[in-house]
């Protein structure tokens, strides 16, 4: 596919937490790009990457999306919405829906209106097994401190 030439991980620059905080600040304060716009763009990119990994064919594919309560989880929920609309069977598991920050909560409410599986992380960890063609991880973002704990750690 033209959107994703072959890329090695070493070709992608990494940013520290401090760098990402500054990127977010610049996007909003200097360039006027809102968090919801950034989340939509990130989710679109993740969905396109998933489509690429599945060789462009989504019909009949089962995709599991794991989402945390912050921006990374919101982007994962955007990807889930797009993949669902493109024909994949999508199941979304959110660590703690009651703790979603405002913009990811907006994404969650959109998913509630769609015909896809939307459950909590606790429901996921109770399952004996899961089957999927692809799992997208949006549980943790750049604000992680230490090892994943609680339901996030259990989901991982």
Image (tube, grey):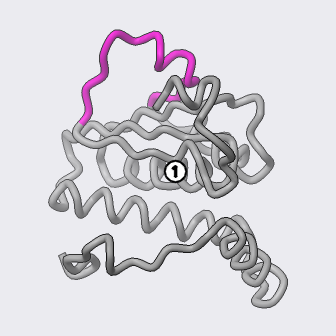
Query: What residue is drawn where x is 34% and y is 41%?
Result: 135
Give the residue furthest to the bottom.
30
Viewer-proximal residue among 122 and 81 = 122
Give the residue furthest to the front.
146
Q: Can you identify the residue that label 1 sits on?
A: 76
Figure label count: 1
Viewer-proximal residue among 112 and 51 = 51
Q: How far across and how far down the image is residue 84, in percent?
A: 39, 46
Q: Within the image, what quadrant is residue 41 found in?
A: bottom right
Residue numbers of the magenta segment: 117-132
Q: Is residue 78 above or below residue 68?
A: below
Q: Quadrant of the N terminus?
A: bottom left
Q: Is residue 126 magenta?
A: yes
Query: What residue is drawn where x is 58% and y is 33%?
Result: 94
Q: Is residue 112 above or below residue 137?
A: above
Q: Within the image, what quadrant is residue 122 found in?
A: top right
Query: What residue is drawn where x is 49% and y is 27%?
Result: 155
Query: What residue is drawn where x is 69% and y is 53%?
Result: 143
């Amino acid at each position: 596919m033209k959107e994703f030439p072959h890329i090695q991980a070493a070709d992608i620059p990494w940013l520290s937490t401090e760098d990402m905080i500054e990127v977010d600040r610049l996007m909003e304060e200097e360039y006027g790009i809102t968090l919801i716009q950034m989340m939509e763009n990130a989710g679109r990119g993740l969905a396109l990457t998933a489509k690429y990994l599945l060789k462009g064919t989504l019909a009949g594919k089962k995709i599991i999306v794991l989402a945390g309560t912050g921006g990374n989880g919101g982007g994962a929920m955007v990807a889930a919405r797009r993949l669902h609309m493109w024909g994949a069977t999508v199941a979304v598991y959110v660590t703690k829906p009651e703790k979603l920050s405002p913009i990811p909560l907006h994404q969650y409410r959109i998913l509630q209106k769609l015909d896809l599986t939307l459950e909590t992380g606790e429901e996921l960890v109770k399952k004996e097994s899961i089957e999927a063609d692809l799992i997208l991880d949006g549980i943790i973002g750049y604000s992680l401190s230490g090892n994943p704990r609680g339901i996030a750690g259990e989901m991982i």
